Image (tube, rainbow, N blue to C red):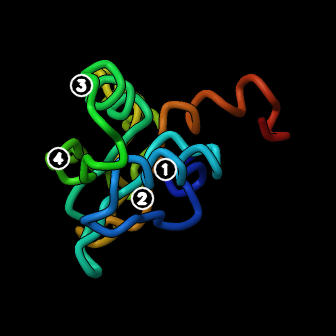
Amino acid sequence: MLKVKDRMAQRLNTIPEGSSSLDAAKYLAERRFSSIFIARGEQVVGMITDTDLVRKIMAAGKDAAKTKVEEIMTTTLFSIDLNAALTEANDMMDKHRLRHLAVTENGKIISVISIRDLIHPAYTDGEGW
C-alpha cells in the first residue's frame, strides 16, 4: 500500500513571514509549485496557494507587492501523517475540498502533498510532468 511519504514533496518549502505576496507568487512561478508554507523562524504559521493569490490578490484588486503573505495566508492547516495511506489523503482532500495537505512527522510539519501528487502517476506512469 502506498503511503503519503511515497508521493509527498521531498523538502519543506517556505518563505518568511513578512514577505510580499508578489514574492510568494514569484517563488511559486519559478519553481512551478502550487503552494508554499509561511514560516516564522523555524515554525510554519500558514500556507499560500496559487488559488489564494488569484482570489485574494488579483480578483480583489490588491497590490501584490504591498500585500504581506500573512494577510492572505491560510492559518488553519489540514494535516496528515507521512505514514498514512494515500487513500486517506485522498479521502481527506475530497471531504474538505482541499488541494493541499501539510504532511507531519511526530506532529511537526515536514512537507506537503497535493492532489497533483495523488493523480500524477496515474497519467504519466511516474515519468514526471
Residue 76 shown left or right of residue 57 in the figure: left
Q: Quadrant of the C terminus?
A: top right
**In the depicted structure, whether residue 51 falls above or below residue 126:** above
Q: Residue at x 28, y 24 (%)?
A: 61
Residue 110 shown left or right of residue 129 in the figure: left
Asked whether disc 2 touches disc 1, contact meaning CB atoms under 8 Å apart, the reply is yes
- The residue positioned farthest toward the bottom in the image shown: 41
Label 4 vs label 3, nearer the camera = 4
Residue type pointed to by label 3: His
**Pointer 2 residue:** 82
Residue 122: x and y in percent read: 71, 25
**Pointer 1 residue:** 4
**Pointer 3 residue:** 96
Q: Secondary structure at mark 4?
A: helix
Give the spatial CA distance, label 4 vs label 3: 23 Å
Residue type pointed to by label 2: Leu
Q: Secondary structure at mark 3?
A: helix
